[in-house]
Amino acid sequence: MQGAGTRDGAKVLFAAPVQALDCPSGGSPQIVGDAQGALVAGGNAIRGTRVGAGPMGEAERGEAAPRRRVLFWCAQGHETHVAFASDAEVPDLWDCPRCGLPAGQDQSAPPPAPRTEPYKTHLAYVRERRSDADGDALLEEALAKLRARRGA
Ligand SMILES: [Zn+2]
């Protein structure tokens, strides 16, 4: 009694997909096994689904490694999103990609800018030492020298 019931169940498993697929090449149970490998107990059929790029295979290999997004803020208020692998150690500081200042994970208390700012240009240093009025005076002085030399 029980044995017969199991055999009937197996027959239904093979028969139903054949009708659903309406396969032009005869609809043999072997072909159905390739397309619906998980339902069929045959080892070859399951290997077939792994190799063929069916929708099933894509779902299986589409899983990305687990990650977490961490936010960093620099002293100038730039917000930086960095994705880390979930098992990676997240550093306390991250260089801001926009201004080069160190950025921390606490938005209300970003790390202070270091004394030697790495991305400052020569002109920026000059402007720090000289005001615009100083610049005008220097320019005037240089022009005066130039005029004196030309006049001589
Ligand atoms: Zn920044």
Image: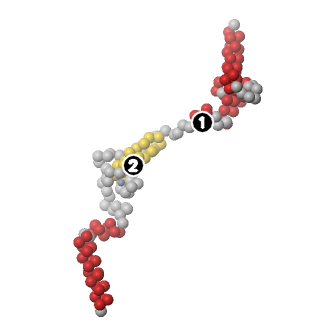
The residue shown at (32%, 51%) is: 77
Query: Which residue is at the far bottom?
Result: 152
Q: Residues within 10 Å of mark 2 (few under 14, many from 20)?
A: many
Residue behind mark 1: 58
Q: In the image, what residue type sits under mark 2?
A: Thr
- Viewer-proximal residue among 35 and 64: 35
Residue behind mark 2: 80
Relative to 31, 99 lies left or right: left
- Viewer-proximal residue among 105 and 19: 19
Relative to 85, 10 lies left or right: right
- Viewer-proximal residue among 98 and 27: 27
Query: Residue 119 is drawn in which quadrant?
Result: bottom left
* Image spot of residue 110 (x, y percent): 31, 50
The residue shown at (35%, 56%) is: 101
Query: Which residue is at the far top?
Result: 1
* Image spot of residue 45 (x, y percent): 70, 29
Q: Earlier in the sequence, mark 2 or mark 1?
A: 1
Q: State whether residue 77 appears in this view.
A: yes
Query: Residue 50 is drawn in which quadrant?
Result: top right
Q: Quadrant of ligand 1?
A: bottom left
* Image spot of residue 52 (x, y percent): 67, 36
Q: Is mark 2 within 8 Å of ligand 1?
A: yes
Q: Is residue 26 above or below residue 146?
A: above
Q: State whether residue 10 appears in this view.
A: no
In the rendered image, the quadrant that contains the C terminus is: bottom left
The residue shown at (38%, 57%) is: 100
Q: Is residue 151 above or below residue 49?
A: below
Task: Give the spatial CA distance, label 2 vs label 1.
Answer: 32 Å
Q: How is the image coloured?
A: secondary structure
Q: Residues within 10 Å of mark 1 (few under 14, many from 20)?
A: few
Q: Are marks 2 and 1 in contact (CB under 8 Å)?
A: no
